[in-house]
Amino acid sequence: MEHYRAHILICAGTGCISSGSKKVEAALREQLVKKGLDKEVKIVETGCHGFCEMGPLVVVYPEGVFYVRVQETDAIEIVEEHLYKGRIVERLLFKENGALDGIPNYKDIDFYKKQMRIILANCGHIDPEQINEYIAVGGYEALGKALTKMKPEEVINEVKKSGLRGRGGGGFPSGIKWGFTRKAAGDKKYVICNADEGDPGAFMDRSVLEGDPHRVLEGMAICGYAVGADEGYIYVRAEYPLAIKRLRIAIKQAEELGLIGDNIFGSDFSFHIKIKEGAGAFVCGEETALIASIEGERGAPRSRPPFPANSGLWGKPTNINNVETFANVPQIITKGADWYTSIGTERSTGTKVFALTGRINHTGLAEVPMGITMREIIYDIGGGIQGGKKFKAVQIGGPSGGCLPEELLDMSVDYDSLLKVGAMMGSGGLVVMDETTCMVDISKFFLSFTQAESCGKCTPCREGTKRMLEILNRITQGLGKEGDIELLEVLAKNIKQTALCGLGQTAPNPVLSTLRYFRDEYEAHIKEKRCPAGACTGLIQYKINEGCKGCGLCATVCPVKAIHGEKKALHTIDQDKCIKCGACMAKCPFKAITKG
Amino acid sequence: MKTIEDLKRLREQIQSETRVRHEGSKQIIVGMGTCGIAAGAREVLSAILDEIAKRKLEDITVRQTGCIGMCEKEVLVDIVLPGEPRITYGRVTAADIPKIITQHVINGHLIKEMVVGKIIE
């Protein structure tokens, strides 16, 4: 038996792979062989650590040194200095903004200090393609406990007591939902895991599936036992090929060990899991449309009631939950509901994984206890706004959510508080915006997304969102009229009340939310034909002022030859030709061109 | 996997493989500065690893450190047992390793004639 004295853990989540972690891995393997260390040092591919801005990430044990932005060419130094001589490679350590000293251990980095990694505990620390590593950290113990020591009703009670609420965005108490499915009449029941994760910018579920797939399988199996289902489906969007690959490997390995399949742990309980790939429709993240898709129908929602708990997949009682919800279940069973309720707030227990995106310094994934403030997430964990700019708003809940302006930064982040201020938790995607973001443009962006994804089945969503989008397009092009804002509000209220499914019902949210906190921006666009943030290209003009020395450099870089002037005389820009690319402003050595 | 006991047994078996990622309670530290390497620290390190593999020892972290200045006495090997001060052995060869591991790491007795120093935090 070989004894490996060191492990090199390389992040193989989608983010780091895109940054080149596979090349880093190949280079490290080559160097280890060259130095004769390949029998002593093991290379392990792990899932996502969450610190995506700093990838590719490499962690070396036993010291637990956290190396960031590792390139192929760094492999020589890591092997020679660290693995061979035991000297940490200082220049590859993470350094806080402006600091001179590197921080070797990730636990000491601000990004991680305020996090409470429970769902993501194994991501970055185990090889997701080895079931052994999941078992080594206590995997499948919860399933064993549930099957051999608890009755199905006891499992449901424990989940109810824990206060776990759906992490897909709805926030419905999971234990209660499981109870409905259990009570529903019929012998054939299903469990479905919603892994469609359609919100733009959200990748929490992706990281869990890529980094710790067994946790989700275990959660589904426990649910199956509790509600009386013997079959489970994982509906994964096809845009996540790595997650699908790792899930397939995980299911196969779990079946080989008898942890998924017939008579698990020698009990009467059997549970099989299948994977169904999505086909690119955002609406299939909605539970009834998802079910239709698995059935082979076109992905379009159905009216509820009946709810899936009573009549779901092929008309049978079905319990459908989000990836993150299932990922919470194993620890609730092993550690107990009382442990879970000690985290978070009274009505929003546990932790939530957030995807930090936008104009923030540390983009990535962070898991925090419910009740933390948005300020802590953005500044303490996220490292503040890029370029030292001013914070403007943060969009939470994706295309179904709303924005929080600066005055709400200190509110508690939990399901109910967010609803009160016109936002919603959603799946956990956060888009941070600064002073250069136009709020009208943002609401137009989200609405054009939901409009494109509207399945077309119901008139309010199909026609209503289109009309709202037309109005927003006019406003951002400087063609807004008096009465547009009021019309948007009327349309929004109607669509919210009459649309068939969550997509339509929440599509107007970004518009309503930005109107609530940034109405003045809309008014500036309409009444003054001005975009305060300077973002809407239809409303900005590049102008040359008296600082112009007539050097003609701007004219040489203009791609559409819109600038004219005599040598040494004031030049002018033909606004009809100008395509607002900004090349002239960047080139002018006298800063004589302004945007406004 | 027929019973929970099967799972527990499998877990214990596998835990030894990922133990490297957790701080072991016993530490063996080999000086691997240029002086150490020149004096043969690589061979000493390999001997340590072979011994641990041969005897299926658990809960030991093996790592390297740089030159502490006592170049004359390389190869230097430090042993840290829980609750004990860090002991440094000097002029260690691969042949000494079985004795150091049996006598000190496993049974907790110092090999006085090889000790060059004791580091107390």
Image (cartoon, coloured by chain):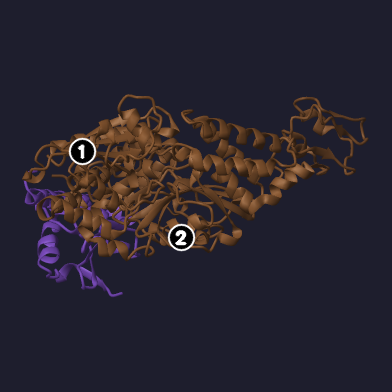
Chain colours: A brown, B purple
Instruction: Write down the quadrant of residue B27 in the picture.
Output: bottom left
**Residue A12 visible in the picture:** yes
Q: Nearer the viewer, residue A479 or A20?
A: A479
Where's the N terminus of chain A, which quadrant? top left
Q: CA distance from mark 2 to mark 1?
A: 45 Å
Helix or strand or loop: what does disc 2 sit on? helix
Q: Nearer the viewer, residue A272 or A564?
A: A272
Task: Residue type at mark 1: give it.
Answer: Lys
Q: Is residue A503 above or below residue B89?
A: above
Q: Position of residue A88 (x, y in %)?
A: 39, 55
Q: Position of residue A176 (x, y in %)?
A: 28, 52
Residue drawn at x 56%, y 58% as measured from the top left? A98
Q: Nearer the viewer, residue A276 or A256?
A: A276
What chain is tagged by disc 2? A
Residue drawn at x 62%, y 52% as measured from the top left? A516
The numbered dot on residue A189 is: 1
- Residue assigned mark 2: A110
Mark toward the start of the polypeptide (2 vs 1): 2
Mark 2, Cα crowd under 10 Å, few <14 / some 14-19 / many 20+, is some
Q: Is the same chain shared between marks 2 and 1?
A: yes
